[in-house]
Amino acid sequence: MLSKFNPTGRQDAGAPEGGGYRDRFAQDCADFTTLPIRLPPMFPHRAHADTIPWQPGPYPGVELKVLHRNPATGGVTVLRRFAAGTTVPAHVHPLANETAYVLQGEWIEDDVTYTPGTCFFAPKGERHGPHVAHQEVISLTVFDGPLTVA
């Protein structure tokens, strides 16, 4: 004997009088939306950049919006804004790998121009830069450890 799909466990899960299984299934699913179950959010941390103020970055002309900070590693995910005319000197991040994705503007390093859509990675301890922004540049940048520069 075939068993009927019965997500509610009710005894009356058969076809309603004059209706079909689709009608019964639709009613069963509707019943689930009224249950007093509160599920945890899919993403326990959420941030909207419009609600976070810019704060000074590690160099003049650089500002950051900290979107997330990992308390276990000290890592941060930031929006980073370089004002037009900013040059960040060559530097090292001794405690973190850096992954940056250019969202807006053109970022120039070693005579290579990085445009929106470019993603690049700088391993922890590797010297990189200088970075030059002839126009305003915004990047989404992830540091997997504390954001320090040397």
Image (cartoon, rainbow, N blue to C red):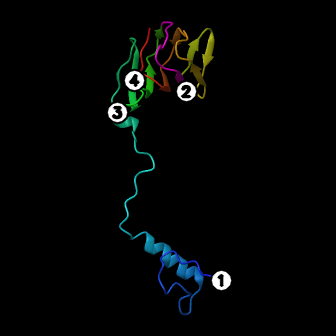
Q: Is residue 57 above or below residue 43?
A: above
Kindly identify the amino acid type of the residue bearing the numbered disc 2.
Tyr
Q: Nearer the viewer, residue 88 or 41?
A: 41
Q: Are marks 1 and 2 in contact (CB under 8 Å)?
A: no
Which portion, as a residue range, is magenta? 89-100
Judged from the image, the secondary structure of the residue bearing numbered disc 4 is strand
Q: Residue at x 47, y 76 (%)?
A: 8
Report the residue marked by disc 3: 52
Kindly identify the amino acid type of the residue bearing the numbered disc 3.
Ile
Report the residue marked by disc 4: 64
Question: In the drawing, does residue 3 fall left or right of residue 47?
Answer: right
Judged from the image, the secondary structure of the residue bearing numbered disc 3 is loop
Report the residue marked by disc 1: 2
Q: Main secondary structure of the magenta part?
A: loop
Q: Residue at x 49, y 76 (%)?
A: 28
Report the residue marked by disc 2: 101
How far apart marks 4 and 1 lie (CA) works out to 61 Å
Q: Tell me the quarter of the picture where residue 69 sits.
A: top left
How far apart marks 4 and 3 lie (CA) works out to 10 Å
Image coords of residue 3 (percent x, y): 61, 81
Q: Are marks 4 and 3 in contact (CB under 8 Å)?
A: no
Kindly identify the amino acid type of the residue bearing the numbered disc 1.
Leu
Q: Are marks 3 and 1 in contact (CB under 8 Å)?
A: no
Q: Tell me the quarter of the picture where residue 19 sits.
A: bottom right
Image coords of residue 70 (percent x, y): 40, 31
Tell which circle, 4 or 3, labels the residue nearer the N-terminal end: 3
Image coords of residue 61 (percent x, y): 40, 14
Question: In the drawing, does residue 87 fall left or right of residue 121?
Answer: left
Q: Is residue 8 above or below residue 84?
A: below
Tell which circle, 4 or 1, labels the residue nearer the N-terminal end: 1
Label 4 or label 1, whichever lies nearer to me, is: 1
Q: Are marks 4 and 2 in contact (CB under 8 Å)?
A: no
